[in-house]
Image (tube, rainbow, N blue to C red):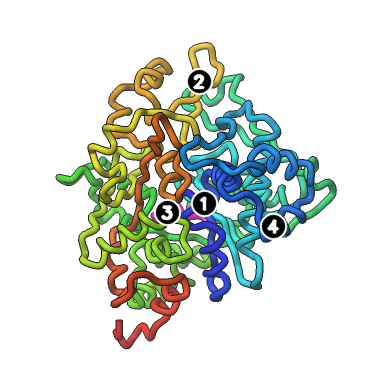
Amino acid sequence: MGVAVSHWPLARAVASAGQLGVVSGVGIDTVFVRRLQDRGVDDELQSVLDRFPCPSVVEEVVAKFGTTRRPEWKQYRGVPMLSHRTVQSSQDLNVLAAYAEVAQAKAGHDGLVGINLLTKVQIPTVPILFGAMLAGVDYVQMGAGIPVEIPGILDRLAQGELVETQLNVTGNASAPHVPVLRFDPERLTPHRALRRPRFLAIVSSHVLAKTLARRSTGKVDGFVVESPVAGGHNAPPRGPLTLDDDGSPIYGDRDRVDFAAIKDLGVPFWIGGGVTSPQRVREAFDLGAAGVQVGTLFAYCRESGMDPPLKEKVIAAARNGSVRVMTSARASSTGYPFKVACVDGTLSDKEVYARRRRVCDLSYLREAYLKADETVGYRCPGEPVESYLAKGGRREDTVDRVCLCNALASTAGFGQVRRESFREPPIVTSGDCVNDIALLLGGKSDYSAADVIAYLQNDWASGSY
């Protein structure tokens, strides 16, 4: 659920209710330092930080970001943009941020907690995984790419071994200057073995599931099968891309999942996308699923990390069924379709989009590319157009692109302040069935994570909802 919408309070609430609570690991270093600037270190966070195995890292980060509260009108202090040249302090920050998020999610109960990452965001992945493992994370989920290397990486991290991965670059990947990303857990926790979490690959087809089961570097413990109605990034349709009148990709018969084929792989699977009623849960079990993945209903509950005024605006619109969701083929710089809910005051509004000055200062979705001299550079079609063109990008790739990094941070209440106190506008991503919130609300104005679980667990066969 984007950046920090599925944060530790929501994951804790879900895990406390007996289900798997999942925190978002995307942009977790930025979320952590912006929380410190806004809120400082409370007693609960301090107790978590006191258990981190490398106190010098905690001292450095808190001294830099957590000693003085930020006035609302002032910019957040930033973190270095990610690159293969990322210094050790950037890796340490990602380890600490993931550790703190998972440790707080796991506090006070004995339920299960997972972390979700995007395969496309490669550079901070290994440090984040290690930080989550230090805190005892139970599951790792990854999609938005083909995460064949992750199971083996989890194996090596569990044994405290050095992890090396080649940076994914656009261009001649066999060129001698393509760098290797290195992370050594020994520096932070010498001679300490960790429990390996279970790994769930997020897939959109039985074909991809088979590929991951066959080619992965270690054990894939299960699959989350997401349909195109799910929020966030979607897999593109198989075959030639065709768009409807609204510019949304058209999915056809080739995109239907063969659940029998996935079941034959012999590992559990969960179904995600459009799970907004007890009937959808029953249908998933009938297909042989071990359970369901739920995003949209949790995104608007009291415990979610979405900025409260924005959350209230969507809930009010959903009560009368007026939230429209588009599958944008242009918004995300990743090239994947991305679900955008049309909400006033967000980047779905053309006037809001036009007012925003392009800036790229968070860097999570930048692509690495080989320059003419075979050194590595970084670019994003969401950055200033002339800058992107100077790096060899095509002008047509910049049209209607959104800076998801800044926008999703704003959705969670951590929007950067720009010139004249202008705050980065948010973007709301939701599944197609967001208006089904009204069925859960009944006559209420809000609801809790526990309400979502109770609603979905209600007598599936009775149709009482």
Report the Cα–Cα distance between label 4 and label 3.
Answer: 26 Å
Q: x%, y% of residue 400?
A: 28, 34
| Mark sitting earlier along the chain (2/4) | 4
Residues 447 and 69: in front is: 69
Which residue in the structure is indicated by mark 3?
307
Residue carrying label 4: 135
**Is 207 in the magenta?**
yes
User: Disc 3 residue type?
Assistant: Asp
Rendered location of residue 413, percent (x, y): 45, 49
For image coordinates 40% across by 27% down, the residue present is 383
What segment is highlighted magenta in the picture? Answer: 201-210
Residue 412 vs residue 212, the one in the foreground: 412
Q: Quadrant of the N terminus?
A: bottom left
Q: Residue at x 47, y 23 (%)?
A: 171
Q: Residues within 10 Å of mark 2 (few under 14, many from 20)?
A: many
Task: Please report contact status of discs 4 and 1: CB closer than 8 Å, yes or no.
Answer: no
Decide if residue 34 is on the left or right side of residue 342: right
User: Which residue is denoted by mark 1 in the rendering?
Assistant: 142
Amino acid at pointer 4: Ala
How packed is label 1: few (under 14 Cα within 10 Å), some, or many (20 or more)? many
Please tell me which residue lies in front, 8 or 373. 8
- Sequence-wise first label, 2 or 3: 3
Q: Which mark, residue 370?
A: 2
